Amino acid sequence: MRVSLTARAAIVSVALFLVFIGAWHLATRGTSATAAMSPEYAKLMGVTATQGKSAMPGPVDVGEKLWGHLKRPFYDNGPNDKGLGIQLGFSIARVLVGYLIAVAVALPLGFLVGMSPLMHKALDPFIQILKPISPLAWMPLALYTIKDSSVSAIFVIFICAIWPMLINTAFGVASVRKEWISVARTLEVGTFRRVFTVILPAAAPTILTGMRISIGIAWLVIVAAEMLVGGTGIGYFVWNEWNNLSITNVIIAILMIGLVGMAFDQVLARVTRLVTFPE
Amino acid sequence: MTDFISIEGIAKRYPDRAGKITTIFENLWMPIVRGEFACIVGHSGCGKTTVLNILAGLDRPTDGAVIVDGEAIEGTSLDRAVIFQSHALFPWRTVAGNIAFAVSSKWPKWTRAEVARHVQTFVDLVGLTGSESKHPSELSGGMKQRVGIARALSITPKILLMDEPFSALDALTRGTLQDEVRRICLETGQTTFMITHDVDEAIYLADKIFLMTNGPGAMLAEVVENPLPKDRGRIELHRHPLYYATRNHIVDFLVSRSRTFADTVKDRDPRLVPLVRPGIAEPVLLALAKPVASPAEATSHLAGATGRIASKGETP
């Protein structure tokens, strides 16, 4: 019997993962020379110097630490020592707030630009100039005017998430099939009903593609933004653990950032499938 | 005017890139009687679709007006339903949902149950009973167009407008759908205006066939009255003695006269378009020795047209 493609792909994935873990384990086993030193000095230097252990954590170290984090995701020992769950929660909340504000602005504006050739031409230069600006370039301006680092981070998320949604919405709305618009016209459907019963469902797949791109960018940017603003969040956690020289925690944070980003993407991909109808 | 639809001197002109004005057609007059099935035949670019879009209210004439039931039309109306060539169904709505969209547009105050009952009537009429909750992607091309027909008929329009509704279908499906449309139009006395490229389709369905010359500067050359009986069937259509005379007349027009017509006919009043009724061809004279049968019935409104047809009335 032939194994299905999905099963075969899964076997290859697992094999690649095992090869990677194996290589990682071998590379960080640590065989470098140890220097003779007094016991007190050796205590200060740690296992890297005394036993020749690699400074780079191996998969076992990371696994142990990860298990510790997963057992206690929400502990709070003060400003510089919070559970991974709390840090991720802060980041997700910021991304969602900034993203939802961007949705609330980009969708109506996208409909306006897509439906009105005048507004399309009038707003196009602004969109073209604002779109390529790195969201982090807004950070000083945001910090200066808003004066609150957490809100500034949300603003940066808003400003980076808005463009793909705005452009995709405008494009989706403008390229609704002419026949569908004609159907609505011959049936004397009013503007309000036309927008919600014809244009919105017709443009929904394109709009959701824009929303999917936006959430991806927002999640990329939040890490960098939180490194700048500090305090809380997974981005801050990464930078803080780098300052603590805890490479293990940095690796765990990288893994978590990837998993959360994938979850966001999958949710929107599923919604896109729900609103996409083949003709 | 006693005509139900009266197209009065409409023109369509577009400025081209260089700013020069191209006239697709101008001073076009067309009368359509209530309850009649009218077909417009002509080559691509003669402005057939533009005429239909003007009738639908989707396009405006540069000049002239269209009078329907005594009133000049202004934009689209729920009195005029369009069946699109590409069926134009909403893929996110089911069969019933697509028809219900039209029904609730026409009668916004109806309850859900009233709409559903009305929708069901038209689903049954086009023979889609049982497929109400399917999405368009689950339907064949013919079934999709049935939904398009049901959607157009469900708003009980005064005029049904069809833009090459069957051209995207295979021959078998096209035949059955033509039968359905003819049955429905005869039963309901629906006034219908259709564009087609298919001469046989025009002869089967239409009461009057409007022949348009080539564009730009297209004009209505003549109106052919279908001489075939009302109860004609699609299968034995080509056995009728008048079938080939009618067919040849139209094909001749499309092949040669549609090109040369504008040059040969000058200073014609565009309001007085000849109405032609093709008749049986006169027998060809073989020899003088034997007695020749008297010319068979030739009932054309125009003597000239009859003679012309008679001279080439043989079947291909």
Image: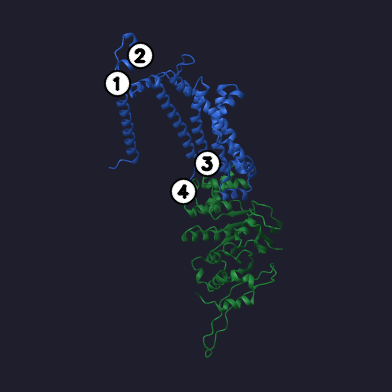
Chain colours: A blue, B green
Query: Where is residue B160 drawn, in percent x and y?
Result: 60, 57
**Label 1 sits on residue:** A32
Task: Label 4: state its secondary structure.
Answer: helix
Q: What whole-number distance in Å separates the C-alpha atoms at marks 3 and 2? A: 57 Å
Nearer-the-camera pick, B39 or A101: A101
Q: Between tags 3 and 1, which lies in front?
A: 1
**Chain letter of the residue carrying label 1:** A
Q: What whole-number distance in Å separates the C-alpha atoms at marks 3 and 1? A: 56 Å
Q: What whole-number distance in Å separates the C-alpha atoms at marks 4 and 3? A: 22 Å
Task: Label 1: state its secondary structure.
Answer: loop
**Chain letter of the residue carrying label 4:** B
**Label 2 sits on residue:** A45
Query: Where is residue B294 drawn, in percent x and y?
Result: 57, 83
The three-letter amino acid code for the residue at tag 2 is Met
Outermost bottom residue: B289
Q: What whole-number distance in Å separates the C-alpha atoms at marks 4 and 1? A: 67 Å
Q: Residues within 10 Å of mark 4 (few under 14, many from 20)?
A: some
Query: Do marks 1 and 2 share a subunit?
Result: yes
